[in-house]
């Protein structure tokens, strides 16, 4: 009897949890197709808010800026974070622990502190560059935005790739060297394929966090508007159904990327399991 009640409570908890998480998203998606601007009553199906969205130049420009910065920062942060993970993995245990703890600070640090500290750094650079004849002094905008996004993305790459490196059997790398590979060939043929799922996962996390970021971007964007900043500016006046339409498109795109990524990882895992079973036989 107790077991039956426990299972019932577990099911109720799961249902309530998923309702709490996904009902607001479902509500937003439904009302992105609402004919009227109101969000308390569904008056009819329409696609006019999506058509209006794709003719809104300011939103499309902000979306392009966000996508451009997200892709560039995710690529650069993934490369830097992967290189840093390899360097950390080669350290002694005490040094690795120290560097890992230092790397963890930006993750737990409030975003407002990170945003303001980066802004102060860029302002200090501009003052120094203004006194120099060969340094560019007007960098506030896309350059500072890109640097800021790279800065807060790198730790997430390190924390995704490092555990995979710990699981890696170093004997595979040593065997590749014994069989005639130089260190570069051994890395690209042995190490990189093994950690590629973690690298892909880190890249997707960086991409998502970069598109989603508001606080750090707000302090370091200069006169450039990213999508979250543009949405914030719009919601200060009145919430438009165009925002529902835009958020719905972003949700569907990100969900699709996650599903494709999980499918690729699942297929790779099944392939590895089949290989292991074949070797065992």
Image: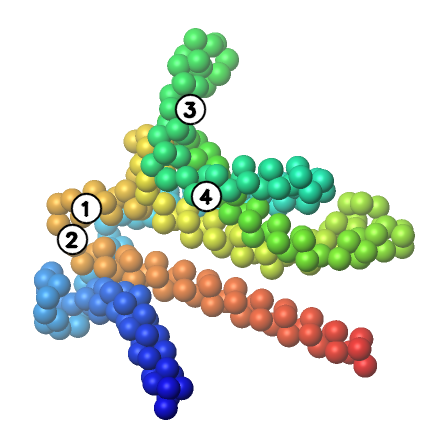
Q: Where is residue 253 in the image (x, y as percent from the top left)?
A: 39, 61
Estimate the spatial distance between the alpha carbons at disc 4 and disc 1, rounded to whole Å: 29 Å
Viewer-nearest residue: 197 or 108: 108
Q: Position of residue 12 (x, y in %)?
A: 31, 78
Q: In which quarter of the image is residue 224?
A: top left
Residue 10 lies in what quarter of the image?
bottom left
Q: How crowded is mark 4: few (under 14 residues within 10 Å), some or many (20 or more)?
A: some
Q: How many numbered dots are placed on residues in this image?
A: 4
Looking at the image, is mark 4 or mark 1 earlier in the sequence? 4
Residue 157 seen in this snapshot = yes
- Please identify the quadrant where the N terminus is shown: bottom left
The residue labelled by disc 3 is 121
The disc, 2 or 3, on the residue closer to the chain's N-terminal end is: 3
Indicate the secondary structure of the residue bearing disc 1. Answer: helix
Q: Label 2, label 3: how many angstroms apart (C-alpha)? A: 35 Å
Residue 20 higher or lower than 8, as above or below: above
- Residue at image point 60% right, 59% down: 197
Point out residue 125 in the picture as x, y percentages from the top left corner.
43, 19
Which element is circle 3 on? helix
């Amino acid at each position: 009897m107790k077991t039956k009640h426990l299972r019932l409570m577990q099911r109720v908890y799961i249902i309530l949890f998923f309702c709490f998480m996904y009902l607001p998203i479902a509500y937003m998606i439904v009302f992105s197709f609402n004919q009227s601007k109101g969000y308390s009553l569904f008056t009819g199906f329409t696609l006019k808010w999506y058509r209006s969205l794709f003719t809104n130049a300011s939103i499309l420009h902000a979306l392009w800026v966000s996508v451009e910065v997200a892709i560039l920062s995710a690529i650069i942060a993934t490369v830097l974070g992967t290189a840093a993970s390899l360097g950390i993995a080669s350290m002694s245990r005490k040094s690795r622990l120290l560097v890992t703890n230092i790397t963890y600070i930006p993750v737990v640090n409030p975003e407002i502190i990170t945003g303001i500290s980066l802004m102060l750094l860029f302002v200090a650079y501009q003052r120094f560059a203004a006194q120099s004849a060969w340094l560019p002094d007007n960098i506030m905008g896309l350059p500072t935005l890109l640097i800021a996004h790279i800065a807060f993305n790198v730790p997430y790459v390190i924390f995704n790739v490092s555990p995979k490196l710990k699981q890696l059997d170093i004997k595979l790398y040593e065997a590749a060297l014994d069989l005639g590979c130089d260190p570069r060939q051994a890395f690209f043929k042995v190490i990189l394929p093994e950690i590629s799922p973690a690298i892909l996962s880190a890249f997707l996390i960086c991409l998502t966090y970069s598109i989603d970021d508001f606080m750090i971007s707000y302090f370091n964007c200069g006169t450039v508007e990213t999508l979250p900043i543009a949405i914030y500016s719009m919601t200060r006046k009145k919430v438009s159904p165009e925002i529902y339409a835009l958020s719905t498109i972003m949700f569907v795109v990100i969900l699709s990327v996650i599903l494709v990524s999980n499918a690729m990882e699942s297929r790779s895992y099944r392939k590895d399991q089949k290989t292991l079973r074949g070797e065992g036989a």
